[in-house]
Image (cartoon, helix red, strand yellow):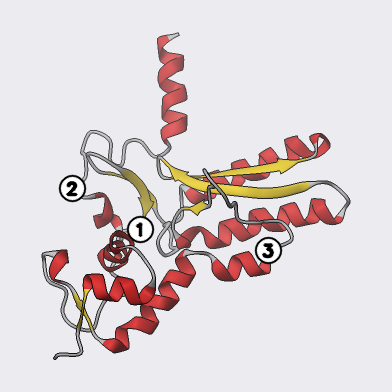
């Protein structure tokens, strides 16, 4: 058993921070060969585990997507740079949005995805585009937003907004443990935080 690696050692081999590695294990789709202890600091990895985790990191970094869509997306760099900051389960939604950008770009319009994030369980995309197509791109952004609220950001399966006491994420039943104990006052009640917020503001006006 001397060939087993600690969590820190595995993170160093993979070139990733410990927090990211723990999150992948917590998700539960890619796990080490040795049984996972309750205390994450006691996790150990076998040498055979490295390649599956390397592949999962590649998926989470959207490396294949960035190669395929280099014409409409270039990763930010430098101080304050933002990236694709959401789970890999939304990759197909991202591809659909960028396919739309590509159509406009091929028609001679300027448009490019800059970065994206998850907020309140929904996909938020940020882009540059010509004024002439701003309305059309905004519509496609709205479509992506709506689809993300029905798609697990971890695996891409059908999902809904899951509300814990301190976090909400759009997850399927298999991954809903990631928000912790559900908040009964909001879980299953609020399915779109933005829409709910607009409704609340309207009720007060």
Question: Mark 1 sits on what residue?
Answer: 172
Q: Are marks 3 and 1 in contact (CB under 8 Å)?
A: no
Q: Earlier in the sequence, mark 2 or mark 3?
A: 3
Q: For this rendering, which residue is in front, 198 or 70?
A: 70
- Distance (Cα) linking label 2 and label 3: 38 Å
Q: For this rendering, which residue is in front, 160 or 66?
A: 66
SS at circle 2 = loop
Pointer 2: residues within 10 angstroms few (<14), some, or many (20+)?
A: some
- Distance (Cα) linking label 3 and label 1: 27 Å
Residue pictured at 24% horizontal, 70% vertical: 8
Residue depth check, mark 1 versus mark 2: number of the one nearer the observer: 2
Q: Position of residue 13 (x, y in %)?
A: 34, 77
Question: Mark 3 sits on what residue?
Answer: 69
Please, which residue is most extreme toward the top here?
205
Q: Earlier in the sequence, mark 3 or mark 1?
A: 3
Q: Quadrant of residue 16?
A: bottom left
Q: Is residue 29 visible?
A: no
Question: Mark 2 sits on what residue?
Answer: 181
Q: Earlier in the sequence, mark 1 or mark 2?
A: 1
Pointer 1: residues within 10 angstroms few (<14), some, or many (20+)?
A: many
Q: Which quarter of the figure is the N terminus placed in?
A: bottom left
Residue pictured at 55% horizontal, 68% vertical: 63
Does 40 appear above or below 34? above
Q: Is residue 178 left or right of residue 110?
A: left
Residue depth check, mark 2 versus mark 3: number of the one nearer the observer: 3
């Amino acid at each position: 058993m001397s060939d087993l690696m600690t969590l820190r050692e595995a993170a160093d081999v993979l070139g990733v921070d410990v927090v990211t590695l723990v999150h992948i294990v917590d998700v539960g789709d890619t796990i080490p060969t040795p049984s996972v202890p309750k205390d994450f600091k006691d996790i150990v990895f076998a040498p055979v585990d490295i390649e599956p985790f390397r592949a999962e990191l590649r998926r989470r970094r959207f490396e294949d997507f960035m190669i395929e869509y280099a014409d409409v997306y270039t990763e930010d760099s430098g101080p304050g740079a933002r990236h694709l900051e959401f789970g890999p389960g939304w990759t197909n939604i991202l591809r659909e949005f960028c396919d739309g950008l590509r159509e406009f770009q091929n028609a001679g319009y300027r448009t490019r995805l800059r970065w994206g994030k998850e907020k309140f369980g929904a996909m938020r995309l940020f882009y540059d585009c010509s004024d002439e197509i701003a309305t059309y791109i905004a519509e496609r952004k709205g479509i992506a937003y709506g689809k993300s609220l029905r798609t697990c950001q971890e695996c891409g399966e059908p999902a809904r907004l899951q509300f814990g006491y301190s976090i909400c994420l759009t997850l399927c039943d298999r991954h809903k443990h990631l928000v912790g104990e559900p908040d009964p006052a909001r879980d299953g009640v609020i399915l779109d935080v933005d829409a709910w917020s607009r409704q609340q503001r309207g009720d007060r006006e």
